[in-house]
């Protein structure tokens, strides 16, 4: 064992109470960081999951028809024109099976599915509700949005004239699986049989969205063989915006990511993360000051011992290392204990407050890599905190402190 | 016989604005086998002289040669290595490291020199402790043995690197009469057996008289 490590451990073990004190300070600091991280990332993950539970990560929308003047101006003729935007004519994505294949094989994309969307009125007896109609292929669609898992009544299948309605819409209309409803468009009304009731955890979607098979939607919306949207799922959700921009460039189709659609949510999440980082930073500063102050006192107490080691041939660099190692060991062991304690605290917190359905009120989320980061940060903080006392120790002049 | 330590016109001045000259042109040599007493009143410059001889401090002017090599141009690292390998120290207070056992204290200079414990180091330290009569106290901490035993452990530590010279500053100053006599006898035995030179700073005229050579210092000058 190197001499510096040997002496550092001897000092730590000899001053057990002092060592325990600074290690506890470090452990508590890291426990606060771990707890905060677990809580905030858990809440954020839960929020994002809930948002993305009813939304594709990236949507490729058929380009909208751009309004244009009826007469063009040229060098001889000036045209005074007031260009009015026409009504929203549905544009379609041409050659979509090939495009879906290309999108699905693009880097960062894990799944892609076709969708035809439009508006309709849903009628049940005398009651009418405006709804968004989505024509989907159930098998591919559920890889984008977990609709199959969200079926609370009936089955996840769309055969012939079958339809899925949201839980809130079903409650509102007083319908359930096996009942019939009609979808009214400009082309007329078509009857559908409710085969499933879904709950995507989003009231707006549950109230205003219905799903039919792609073929039925194409017939209903007068778009035979067409789709106007490609939904995708990405492997890294916070990389969606970057992938969206790339896809737009590659495909020439207007693309929007969930991050763009939920920019306010993202700002809120970022603000929350920033405040969490700020708290963690100040906790680490407090830990560093604690370690530094204890080691400074230790250097003062050990002036004569350091002087003796120097007199007997110990180099200044070795004296420096003795104190840096103490800082590192305190940071390493303290943070390891802190990780365990912080996780226990977070789990206790999670299990002590539950929603009526039994799910935790405060979801906690951890990743192993984060623990490694916390331990590395705390060890580094320990070394940095020990730098000043170590420098102080190395500068001790043996002639001044022995005799 | 060639000198191990050779001080040539050494002076030492402290302070920058108000200067205090503590040593004035000291010429002194210490050779193998010397048993030298340095005596003088408090404040006469004994400790400063010992610090310079022990490479713990540098002269303001003059030269200090160790085994014929001038130390003036050496950097701190070279001086530290030279000090560790050539000189041993025994102080009035034992200054054993309380966190280490008696055995580890004796191994400390060897470990500092090599950077780690190497084979044979533990046995060598054990032998030294046996020699000073502490063979049964290897695992004891310094606060678990008597004052005389601590000072004997400090002597064993001073011998760890087989130094050519041991500088002892009032080595018996903190001990009772019996322990004092025991420690002094031990120093003499080592001097005779190994030829290790000793420079002993002492107030005790009786001890000084038993040394082979007495150097007296008054107001920073050897007389």
Image (cartoon, coloured by chain):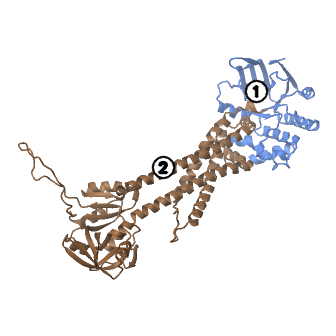
Chain colours: A brown, B blue
Give the answer, above or below, for where A165 lies relative to A381. below
For label 1, the crowd category at 10 Å Cα-Cα, with few meaning under 14, some 14 to 19 and many 20 or more, is many
Give the answer, above or below, for where B63 lies relative to A380. above
Q: Between residues A306 and B3, which one lies in front from this camera angle?
A: A306
x, y (%) of residue A262? 37, 57
Which quarter of the image is occupied by the N terminus of chain B?
Answer: top right
Residue B1 visible from this viewpoint: no
Same chain letter for marks 1 and 2: no
x, y (%) of residue A386? 63, 42
Residue A349 visible from this viewpoint: yes
x, y (%) of residue A53? 40, 66
Give the answer, above or below, for where B144 lies relative to A184. above
The residue tagged 2 is A274
**In the image, is B183 to the left or to the right of A7?**
right
Residue at screen point 10% across, 49% down: A72
Q: Between residues A235 and B128, which one lies in front from this camera angle?
A: A235
Secondary element under disc 2, as helix, strand or loop, is helix
Which quarter of the image is occupied by the C terminus of chain B?
Answer: top right
**In the image, is A125 to the left or to the right of B205?**
left
Label 1, label 2: how far apart the Cα atoms are:
60 Å
Q: Residue furthest front?
A: A126
Q: Quadrant of residue B36?
A: top right
Secondary element under disc 1, as helix, strand or loop, is helix
Q: Nearer the viewer, mark 1 or mark 2?
A: 2
Name the mark on residue B53. 1
Q: Between residues A326 and A194, which one lies in front from this camera angle?
A: A194
Q: Chain of mark 2?
A: A
Q: Residue furthest bottom?
A: A178
Q: Between residues A30 and B54, which one lies in front from this camera angle?
A: A30
Q: Chain of mark 1?
A: B
x, y (%) of residue A168? 38, 72
For label 2, the crowd category at 10 Å Cα-Cα, with few meaning under 14, some 14 to 19 and many 20 or more, is few
């Amino acid at each position: 064992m190197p001499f510096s490590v040997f002496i550092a451990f001897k000092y730590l073990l000899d001053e057990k109470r002092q060592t325990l004190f600074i290690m506890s300070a470090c452990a508590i600091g890291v426990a606060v960081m771990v707890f905060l991280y677990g809580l905030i990332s858990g809440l954020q993950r839960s929020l994002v999951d809930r948002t993305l539970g009813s939304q594709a990560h990236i949507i490729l929308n058929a380009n909208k028809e751009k309004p244009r003047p009826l007469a063009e101006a040229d060098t001889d003729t000036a045209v005074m024109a007031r260009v009015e935007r026409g009504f929203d004519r549905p544009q379609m994505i041409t050659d979509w099976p090939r495009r879906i294949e290309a999108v699905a094989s693009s880097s960062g994309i894990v799944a892609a599915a076709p969708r035809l969307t439009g508006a309709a009125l849903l009628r049940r007896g005398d009651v009418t509700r405006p709804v968004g109609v989505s024509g989907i292929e159930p098998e591919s669609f559920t890889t984008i949005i977990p609709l199959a898992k969200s079926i609370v009544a009936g089955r996840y299948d769309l055969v012939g004239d079958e339809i899925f309605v949201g839980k809130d819409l079903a409650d509102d209309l007083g319908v359930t699986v096996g009942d019939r409803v009609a979808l009214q468009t400009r082309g007329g009304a078509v009857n559908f049989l409710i085969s499933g009731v879904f709950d995507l955890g989003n009231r707006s979607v549950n109230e205003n969205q219905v799903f039919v098979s792609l073929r039925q939607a194409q017939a209903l919306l007068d778009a035979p063989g067409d789709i106007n949207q490609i939904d995708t799922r990405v492997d890294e959700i916070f990389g969606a915006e970057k992938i969206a921009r790339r896809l737009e460039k590659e495909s020439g189709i207007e693309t929007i990511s969930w991050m763009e659609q939920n920019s306010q949510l993202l700002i809120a999440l970022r603000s929350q993360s920033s405040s969490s980082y700020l708290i963690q930073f100040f906790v680490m500063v407090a830990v560093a000051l604690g370690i530094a102050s204890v080691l400074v006192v230790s250097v003062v107490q050990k002036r004569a011992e350091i002087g003796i080691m120097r007199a007997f041939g110990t180099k200044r660099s070795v004296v420096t290392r003795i104190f840096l190692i103490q800082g590192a060991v305190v940071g390493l062991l303290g943070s390891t204990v802190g990780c365990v304690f912080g996780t226990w605290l977070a789990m206790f917190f999670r299990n002590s407050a539950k929603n009526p359905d039994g799910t935790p009120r405060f979801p906690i989320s951890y990743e192993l890599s984060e623990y490694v980061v916390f331990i590395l940060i705390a060890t580094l903080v320990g070394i940095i905190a020990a730098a000043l006392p170590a420098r102080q120790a190395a500068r001790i002049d043996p002639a001044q402190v022995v005799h | 016989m060639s000198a191990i330590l050779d001080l040539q016109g050494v002076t030492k001045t402290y302070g920058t604005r108000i200067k205090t000259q503590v040593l004035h042109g000291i010429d002194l040599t210490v050779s193998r086998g010397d048993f030298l007493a340095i005596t003088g009143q408090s404040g006469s410059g004994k400790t400063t002289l010992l610090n310079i001889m022990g490479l713990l401090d540098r002269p303001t002017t003059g030269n200090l040669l160790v085994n014929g090599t001038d130390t003036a141009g050496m950097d701190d690292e070279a001086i530290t290595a030279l000090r560790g390998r050539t000189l041993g120290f025994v102080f009035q207070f034992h200054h054993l490291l309380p966190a280490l056992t008696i055995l580890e204290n004796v191994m400390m200079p060897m470990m500092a020199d090599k950077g780690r414990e190497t084979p044979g180091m533990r046995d060598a330290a054990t032998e030294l402790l046996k020699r000073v009569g502490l063979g049964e106290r290897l695992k004891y901490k310094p606060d678990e043995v008597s004052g005389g035993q601590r000072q004997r452990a400090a002597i064993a530590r001073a011998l760890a690197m087989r130094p050519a010279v041991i500088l002892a500053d009032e080595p018996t100053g903190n001990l009772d009469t019996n322990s004092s006599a025991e420690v002094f006898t031990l120093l003499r035995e080592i001097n005779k057996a190994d030829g290790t030179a000793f420079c002993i700073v002492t107030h005790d005229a009786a001890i000084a008289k038993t040394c082979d050579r007495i150097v007296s210092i008054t107001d920073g000058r050897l007389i």
